[in-house]
Image: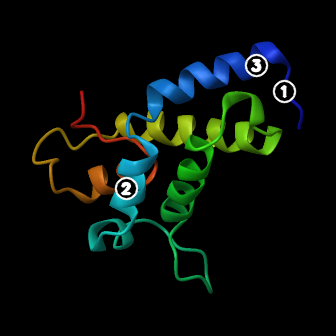
Amino acid sequence: MSFCDDEKAKIWDEYRDAVNMTPKEVERWLETDESKGVGWTHDGEDESVGHQSGRRIVEIGHKRRGDLSDDDYQHMRKVIAYVHRHCAQSPGHDIESSRWRYSLMNWGHDPLKK
């Protein structure tokens, strides 16, 4: 799939709103047991889909905007959708150490971060 400049600009803006953790913060988070302990894993794999996404978010975060590929933009759209969908499912209380928050953090979004 190829994106036009207007689509890329829209995805870029939405992604920057959805991903509120820096690449370094995501990288550090992915090393924790909490990060590794949440999320859905494909049969035969050891790493959750969210954890894989977090590694990809770090890669994207280290690129210049002009160096992003269509595949990067496709993943960015996936991240935006995940964050929006899961933020809407907030447990509403006791979220600081919740699996809900940990899963979102694997996708680059900390709901406690302003």
Neighbour tally class for label 1: few under 14, some 14-19, many 20 plus, Cα within 10 Å: some
84 sits left or right of 111 in the view: right
Q: Earlier in the sequence, mark 1 or mark 2?
A: 1
Residue at mark 1 to residue at mark 3: CA–CA distance: 6 Å
Q: Position of residue 77 (x, y in %)?
A: 65, 36
**Left or right: 29, with 59 as reference point:** left
Q: Secondary structure at mark 1?
A: loop
Label 2 and label 3: CA atoms lie apart by 27 Å
Instruction: Check contact, mark 2 vs mark 3: CB within 8 A.
Output: no
Find the distance from the CA under tag 1 to the CA under tag 2: 28 Å
The answer to which of marks 2 and 3 sits earlier in the sequence is 3
Badge 1 vs badge 3, beta-carbon distance below 8 Å: yes
Q: Residue tagged by mark 1? A: 3
Seen from the viewer's position, the closer of residues 10 and 60 is 60
Quadrant housing the N terminus: top right
Number of numbered tags placed on the structure image = 3
Circle number at residue 7: 3
- Does dot 3 land on a helix, a strand or a loop? helix
Q: Which residue is mark 2?
A: 103
Instruction: Assess disc 3: are there few (<14), some (14-19) or many (≥20) residues with their C-alpha within 10 Å of its C-alpha.
Output: few
Residue nearest the observer in this picture, 13 or 43: 13
Residue at image position (55%, 29%) is 15
- In percent of the image, x 76 and y 36: which residue is there? 67
- On screen, residue 5 above or below 64: above
Q: For the residue marked with disc 1, what is the amino acid?
A: Phe
Q: Amino acid at mark 3?
A: Glu
